[in-house]
Image (spheres, grey):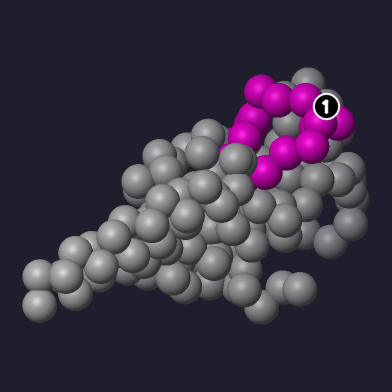
Amino acid sequence: MIKKIITICFLSLAAISYSQEKHDARLLERYTSEELTTIQMENPEEYEILVHALEVGISIGDIQEGKGKDLVFDGELDADPSLDHTYISLGVELINRYQYYKFKGTNKMVIIRPKNLITQIR
């Protein structure tokens, strides 16, 4: 019986250690390995959203003047729009609505997609 308990504990520890090693380094800018492992184990859907949003969570482009209604920005970001960004590198939180930010001093903007739609984007 004790041998089984020790084996289970060892396998659990090995699984946790393995999962910590495979976290995307971009997530580690905001979360610790321990936090990510906890999210991954307790709320795998949330973890999938966080990871997938690194690839599809934002779009950067030019501000289209004069087309349709005026866009209301959620704020300005002091970042270089020509760099490869994620929602984490821009310091924004994923929420359940579209967010629009202008890049300070440029004609560029970023669209942050809603958290509840991230997994539907392929």
Q: Which portion, as a residue range, is magenta? A: 72-89
Q: Residue at x 66, y 23 (%)?
A: 78
Q: Is residue 85 left or right of residue 32?
A: right
Residue 47 versus residue 106: which sits nearer the camera? 47
Crowd around label 1: few <14 · some 14–19 · many ≥20 (10 Å): few
Q: Is residue 102 left or right of residue 68?
A: left
Quadrant location of the N terminus in the rendered image: bottom left
Occupied quadrant, residue 101? top right
Occupied quadrant, residue 67? bottom right
Residue sitting farthest toward the left? 1
* Looking at the image, residue 11 lies above or below residue 84: below
Residue 117 versus residue 33: which sits nearer the camera? 33
Residue 98 versus residue 82: which sits nearer the camera? 82
Occupied quadrant, residue 14? bottom left
Q: Residue at x 60, y 48 (%)?
A: 24
Identify the amino acid type marked 1.
Thr
Q: On the image, numbered disc 1 is attached to which residue?
A: 106
Q: Is residue 72 left or right of residue 66?
A: left
Q: Is residue 57 left or right of residue 9?
A: right
Badge 1 marks a residue whose secondary structure is loop
* Picture coordinates of residue 102, whole percent (x, y): 71, 36
Q: Is residue 95 visible?
A: no
* Looking at the image, residue 10 lies above or below residue 108: below
* Picture coordinates of residue 22, whole percent (x, y): 56, 52
* Picture coordinates of residue 26, whole percent (x, y): 61, 41
* Picture coordinates of residue 38, whole percent (x, y): 33, 57
